[in-house]
Image: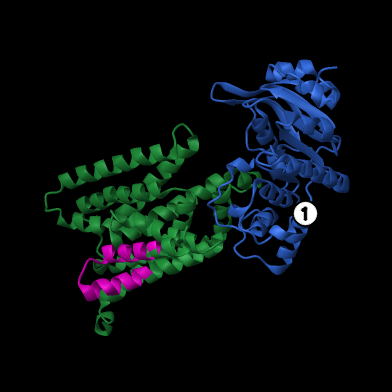
Chain colours: A blue, B green
Amino acid sequence: MTAPDAADADAIAVDALTVRYRDHAAVQDVSFRAASASFIAIVGPNGSGKTTLLKALLGLETPDAGTVRVLGRPPDAVPAGQIGYVPQIKTFERSFPAVAVELVLSALHQRWPFRVKEDERTQAVQALDHVGAHHLADRALGELSGGELQRVYLARSIIRQPRLLLLDEPATGVDRAGAHDLYDLLDAYQARTGATVLMVTHDWNAAYHHASHVLVLDRTQISYGPPDAALSEANLRQAFGHVGHAHAMLIGRNPDD
Amino acid sequence: MIDALSLPFMQRALVAGVLVGLLASYYGVFVVQRRLSFLGIGLSHAAFGGVALGLLLQVNPMWVAVPFTVAVALGINWITVRGNVTGDTAIGVLFAVAVALGIVFLSLRQTYTADAFAYLFGSILAVRPADVWVMGAVALASLGTAPLWGRWAYATFDRDLARADRVPVTRDDYVLVTLLAITVVAAVKVVGIILAAAFLVIPAATARLLVRTFSAMTGVAMGIGVLTAVGGLLASYGLDVPSGATIILGQALLFFIALIGTGR
């Protein structure tokens, strides 16, 4: 296993990263660093490479060029449990027979539990309690709403108190109030543990109000920095095309002023 | 009926039925939850190529069908992992190749091919001691790989989630399809090429209707597999009808009862 670089205080260090699918560059020449205990949001339109970048951080995609270091190591050398991962719930297979506590425990031993031991169940329920979802412990996953499912995934991702939390569109399929709660939970987890949080999102507003740094991506890197600078109207227009009044509303200014 | 149980061929048939019932249902839960029913059909038809080669070489067809079907299964997995074509396309191509080879092998034989047709419909009462040894070996291998259940289940739930947790998903899949392929060959002996895939799918699908967790689904599917194999065998003996078809019809009956009973 590669030893962590003691001099590397950054939780994430991405340099000139390019990931290609056949001849198509999903992510091209992206570089950014995230200090420990920072909250990073990656925003960009559909197909902009956000999920590909997240998967490169998880070690699920291999760089075609450039380097990725996570917690001072190449991603595939980071011990299991130090990274918490919340995938997009739209990929969730609802026909799989499982109850919430099993999904939470899958992160504990890196396998699906055949039976749930009492002490592990207590641990899982505590993790669910941290995200206000202890009442969901014995509910079938297929019966949960998007917001409930997202909380269970969040509980799963924090059960081992990871140093880095990676979330892929955590508010997809969640109503506005649920999304608000979710971001508050992330803030609370970060305040409690000092973990680094990186979130892929479509929600500029959440990025603006919760992240310490924002990466705007459209396959190539448009901007990276504090929300005010990274989410400038020019940067958003470059990434998304027409942004209308969205930018003015984002920064809390009446678009008619 | 009690007298029948003292007959060696009936005893072998029962042992084979129990082993295949356990194994096919155990691997069947992964087949059903990964939506790989077509893989079961593909592998059972691929076994036909191996059986035909065994008949051509005048050796026990099982000894040839096992490595032949395993090779096809590994080939399907290898092509799928490469990502150039989808899994169902890989299955469609390789099982057609295996069946075509089987037809060529049979055409090269100088003798009548009635024994090949016995494999199409299965003949549990003609199970040889060597067949039982193969099934016993797969059962032992399955016991030995029981710790992989949790990793296979994890990857079945969400492949990327398992990979992110450093589960060696690709390597585990090669082990799974190898054991699945041998199980399919054993099931071919019991219920035939045409119905072998049903042995993978129906008990697992029935169990899915009845339970809320994957571990319970696995246990209940194995119970249904054994119950229907033994029950079907005894019923077929009593009614003097083909055993393979009786087993599958019994499984289908339970499936429809569960489907209607649970209202899903």
A13 on left or right of A87: right
Region of the chain picked out in magenta, as a range: B228-256
A152 and A118: which is toward the camera: A152
Looking at the image, the residue that sits furthest to the front is A256
Left-right relation of A139 to B34: right
Is A16 drawn above or below residue B130 in the view shown?
A: above
Question: Image point 74% across, 44% down: which residue?
Answer: A178
What residue did someone put label 1 on? A132
Note whether A40 is above or below A142 in the view shown: above
Whether residue B134 appears in magenta in the rendering, the answer is no
Q: Chain of mark 1?
A: A
Residue A257: give x, y in percent of width and height. Answer: 85, 17
Q: Is residue B219 left or right of residue A253?
A: left
Quarter occupied by the N terminus of chain A: top right
Q: Amino acid at mark 1?
A: Gly
Residue A30 location (% of width, % of height): 72, 23
Label 1 neighbourhood size at 10 Å, few (<14), some (14-19), many (20+)?
some
Element class at badge 1? loop
Q: Would residue A147 be seen by someone viewing this image from the given angle?
A: yes
Observer-nearest of B70 and A150: A150
**How many numbered callouts?**
1
Identify which residue is drawn at 66% across, 42% down: A87
